[in-house]
Image (cartoon, helix red, strand yellow):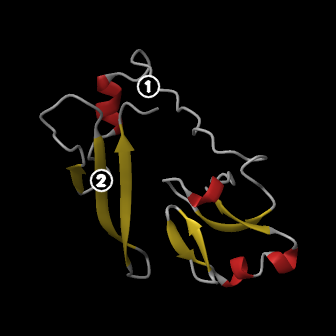
Amino acid sequence: CADEELFCWFRCMALTEETVTCGERSLGLQCVDPRGLVVEDGKGHGDYFPECTNNTHITHPMTPYPEIQQQDEETCTADLWSDFNSEDEYDHMISLKPDPTKEGPDTNLSWSIVESEDGQKKLKARLTFNDVF
């Protein structure tokens, strides 16, 4: 990599004004994820970026993301999902499910264009996921 780049996420990533000055602030330059975990040698695939930190791959090694508790079928019934996901509040809805003819979780985007009191138009949207929480 060039002088103002760091090998991170399997590529050379340009440093920012902040990350160029890590050493001046007694911080190390590392390839990290949003949780501050360090990818050793920048050889990892995911949401990684250069960051000034004193974390290391030894003190903050990569670990899996915590599992999200899945839906309880007795609490989250199909009828409740339908009620929650109704189109009543929105003018439009589209399924983002790759193949709506197959079983599996639903993902829907609902939206409307609303006008504020000052006449500006804004997007009002909701993204819903079934079978995730």
- Residue carrying label 1: 71
The residues tagged by marks 1 and 2 sit, at their Cα atoms, a distance apart of: 21 Å
Determine the secondary structure under disc 1.
loop
At horizontal 81% and vertical 60% (from top left) the residue drawn is 54
Q: Confirm whether residue 93 shows in the render.
A: yes
The local crowd at label 1, few if under 14, some if 14 to 19, many if 20 or more residues have their Cα within 10 Å, is few
Residue 23 image offset from top left, x and y in percent: 82, 76
Residue 98 image offset from top left, x and y in percent: 20, 44
Residue 40 image offset from top left, x and y in percent: 64, 54
Q: Nearer the viewer, residue 4 or 130?
A: 4
- Residue carrying label 2: 110
Quarter of the image for the N terminus: give it: bottom right
Residue 86 image offset from top left, x and y in percent: 28, 41
Residue type indicated by callout 1: Gln
Hey, which quadrant is residue 75 in on the image?
top left
Asked if residue 67 lies left or right of residue 113, the reply is right
Hey, which quadrant is residue 21 in on the image?
bottom right
Asked if residue 21 lies left or right of residue 15, the reply is right
Q: Nearer the viewer, residue 70 or 64?
A: 64
Q: Which dot, 1 or 2, sits closer to the camera?
A: 1
Residue type indicated by callout 2: Ser
Q: Nearer the viewer, residue 33 or 130?
A: 33
